[in-house]
Structure formats: structure tokens, C-alpha cells
Image (tube, rainbow, N blue to C red):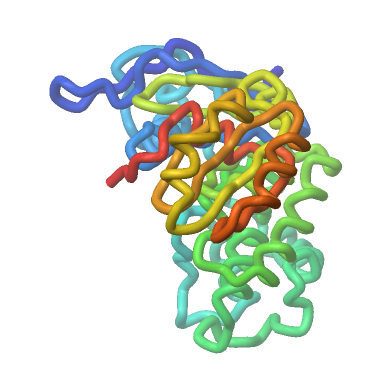
Amino acid sequence: MAPLRVAGLRKRYGAHDVIAGIGFELARGECFGLLGPNGAGKTTTLRCVLGLTQPLAGEITLAGLPVPQQARAARARVGVVPQTDNLDPDFSVAENLLVYGRYFGLPERTIRSRIPELLEFAGLGARAQTSIRELSGGMKRRLTLARALINEPELLVLDEPTTGLDPQARHLIWERLKGLPQRGVTVLLTTHFMDEAERLCHRLAILDGGRIVAQGAPHELIEAHIEPQVVEVYGENAANWAGTHAAGYAARFEVSGETAYCYVSQAEPLLAHLTRQVGLRYLHRPANLEDVFLKLTGRELRE
């Protein structure tokens, strides 16, 4: 049975459909991403999945149990890493894991036996007795991740797990997360970092306006929705240059500020042209998931 199955999920606040009939299913041992701009419905979807918000319609099966009918029992088989750390600053690192494990009704002997392995997993093996107040932001985030595994969950829900971390901390958490599906843990990830989703997710869904606008493996979405190569053209005259020349070289182009994004199948003619232009700089790269995301959801700022 799938660790999570969502079908026909709807949620409305007033006259606004926050979630408009979405559905997806997670396979055991995969990392599934839920992406979207602010206001797309990601957080509401997670709250419905966990039984914290009552949906207007739809079916949710979490860890084999119907939600919200048996949400409490389902959550006992799920681990959650929230957007912000909520560790208890009055306890040590090990005490945070011990107290959290008690919430699941686990025997103290069982919790204590799991703590050393979880601390090693988080790279905090020598920090068991350290106060939470002495940890860096990256250490706290890794401890929150380890804490979510105390009950050996079937499904791990990660809500923007690396927001606010420096690159070193992000990469360390990525390495830890990559190993979880290999251990049979299914992961549901929301993130605003497209490179994070591209690295970690086997499949993902992109939400916009409460609807799923695309779903599939990252490489499949890139192949289906975007040209294979991108040339970014920079400079004060990039917009003027694009208006005059871009259509002759690119299958599609967009201008944002002082950058023109040219989407091409063959970049060589455009690159040869740009080498002759004065005052323009450019970057040639393969298309990525962020290009797909921006094409499907737009470049305008969401509040």
C-alpha cells in the first residue's frame, strides 16, 4: 500500500479555492517533491495530509489509514520536519530526542537505544549533552531531522528543510536525505530551492493556484516543458538587444530586468552572434528545473 495517496483534494477559504481538486500518490522508498510559489497551496495540502486542516472534499490515505478520520493514529507513523525548528532550549540534544520519543508512547529503553544512531546520522555524535542554545543553525536543523526519525516513520514530511542555511549545511543535509529512501523511508518534500528538488526528488508535482500544473520526474519535466539549452544575456542593453535580435536565434525568450533568457535547441549561432556584441555578457547552460518552474508559474513576485 502507498505511504500516501491523495485524490480529489479540495479546500476553500471564503470564495477562494486554495486547493482545487489535486491528487498524487507516493511510492514506498521515493522522495516526492511538492513545489509551487507562495500561495500555491503547498502548506494547506500538507496540513490536510496530516489531518491538521479539514478538507472540503477528497480522499487522503496516510500510512494506510484514512485522514482525517484516523489522523492521530496515522501521524504516529509519520515524521515531520517543520519550516522552523521547535527544539526545547531548556534540554540538551539527547534530552530533546528522549522527550520527543515519549510523545509516540515509545518505551524509554527503545528511545535511548536509537539516540546514538540518530545523533551519528545528524553529525552530532559528540554533542549529546550539548545545550540547544549552543548549537548553530545547521546543527539545529540536523537535530530536527534526526528527531523526526525517532519513531522510525514510514513517511517523512519535510517542509522547506534547508531554508536559511549556508551552502555547507544544506549540502550536509542533502547527503543525509539522499540515504533515507535507500532505507525504505518515503519522503514528501516542499522546497523553494529548485536545485534541491532536482537533486533529491524521484518525482515531483508543481502547484499553482491550487492546481497541479505538471507532475513527473525532474528530467522528464525538463524534457517536456523547456528547450534543452539556455543562454542568459546580461547588461543595460540586454532588453533592447532582445527586442531586436533574440527572436532570430531563440525558440523562445523572456526579459526580466537587465537579463534576457534565450531558450534554444542549438546555441552555437546565438553564441557566435553574442561574441560580436559590445557591452553584453552572457552565460550558456543546460536547462534546469527552475526554468520549468518559472515557465509554468511565471516570474512575477508572489506575496
Is 207 rendered above or below residue 7?
Answer: below
Q: Residue at x 41, y 25 (%)?
A: 68
Name the one closer to the observer, 224 or 48: 224
Name the one closer to the observer, 268 or 199: 268
Residue 274, image x and y in percent?
65, 47
272 displayed left or right of 253:
right
Residue farthest to the right? 182
Name the one closer to the observer, 45 or 163: 163
Is 65 rendered above or below residue 187?
Answer: above
Q: Place residue 154 in its image quadrant.
A: top right
237 displayed left or right of 138:
left
Residue 21, image x and y in percent?
40, 13
Q: Place residue 250 in its image quadrant.
A: top right
From this viewpoint, is residue 76 visible?
no
Q: Residue at x 61, y 52 (%)?
A: 277
Residue 223, image x and y in percent?
71, 23
Q: Residue at x 76, y 62 (%)?
A: 114
Residue 218, image x and y in percent?
70, 31
User: Quick one: quadrant of the N terminus?
Assistant: top right
From this viewpoint, is residue 68 visible?
yes
Is 210 rendered above or below residue 129?
Answer: above
Q: Residue at x 58, y 66 (%)?
A: 141
Count every numbered label the image shows and give the total: 0
268 displayed left or right of 151:
right
Q: Place residue 199 in its image quadrant.
A: top right
